[in-house]
Amino acid sequence: MSECCGGLKLGQKVPMFELDTYEPTKGDFGKFRLEDQIKNKRWTILFFYPADFTFV
Amino acid sequence: MGCDIVTVSTDTQFVHLAWRNSEKELAKVQYPMASDPTGKVSRMFDVYNEDNGLDLRGTFIINSDGALMNAEVNWYNIGRNIEELLRKFKANIYVSRKTNEVCPSKWKDEGDKTLVNPGAKMVGKVHEALAG
C-alpha cells in the first residue's frame, strides 16, 4: 500500500498542518502544529474518529 | 516515550470541551482533542467522508522527522484495538533506534525476538534465524 491517503505516502514527509484543539490538561483551547512536534523531536499519533457524543 | 496522541474529529473544539467534561468515560483523557470542521486535514489523510462530513476511524503514526510511518483505517462499525496500536508504535520506536533489526510478525515488545541484519545469508533461512 504505497499510496493510501489523499496523496500522502508512507515513508514521506507529511505536509505541515495546524488544528484548533481543546486541551484537557489546561482546561483551555489551544493549537496543534505538526511543525512544533518536529521542532521538539516528538512522534505523533493522529487518531481520527467520526463524532463526539456517539458510542465508542 | 517522546510521543503525543492527538484525537481529531470534525466537531469544533467547543463540542470537544463539552464532551470531555460531561462524559465520565473520558475522565482520564489528557491528550489534545483537535477539531477539523472544514475537513481540510482529514482530506489530506483521506479519512473525510464527503457524504456525511464525518471522519472514518483512521490512525496515523508520524515519526519525529514528520514522516508518515503507519496508517490504519477502519469503517465506522469496527473499533480500533489500542493494544495493536501500541504494539505498532513500540515497534516503530524500536526499529528507529535499532536500524539493523526488523520486527517479525510475532513481535510484541522490546525483548522479543527480532531479525538482526537481514541480508543474503538469511534468505530462505528465516525459520532458523527466528529459532536461533
Image (spheres, rainbow, N blue to C red):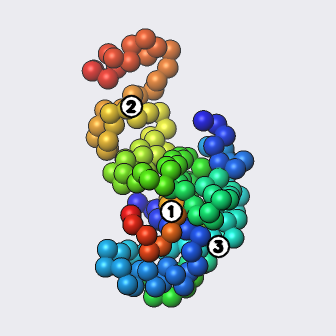
Q: Amino acid at mark 1?
A: Tyr
Q: Amino acid at mark 2?
A: Pro
In the image, residue B41 lies at what x, y percent?
A: 66, 63
Task: Compute the Cα span from label 1 to label 2.
Answer: 29 Å
**Res B37 label:** 3
Q: State whether residue A23 is above or below residue A4.
A: below
Task: Tell me if B125 is positioned left or right of A42 in this view.
Answer: left
Residue at the image point whose x is 63% and y is 65% from the top? B53
Outermost residue on the top side: it is B124
Chain letter of disc 1?
A
**Res B104 label:** 2
In the image, residue B126 lies at what x, y percent?
A: 38, 18
**Res A49 label:** 1
Chain letter of disc 2?
B
Q: Quadrant of residue B47?
A: bottom right
Earlier in the chain: of badge 3 and badge 2, it is: 3
Tags 1 and 3 touching, CB below 8 Å = no
Residue at the image point whose x is 31% and y is 44% from the top? B109
Q: Are marks 1 and 2 on the same chain?
A: no
Task: Tell me if A40 is positioned left or right of B86 in this view.
Answer: right
In the image, residue B59 lies at what x, y percent?
A: 51, 54
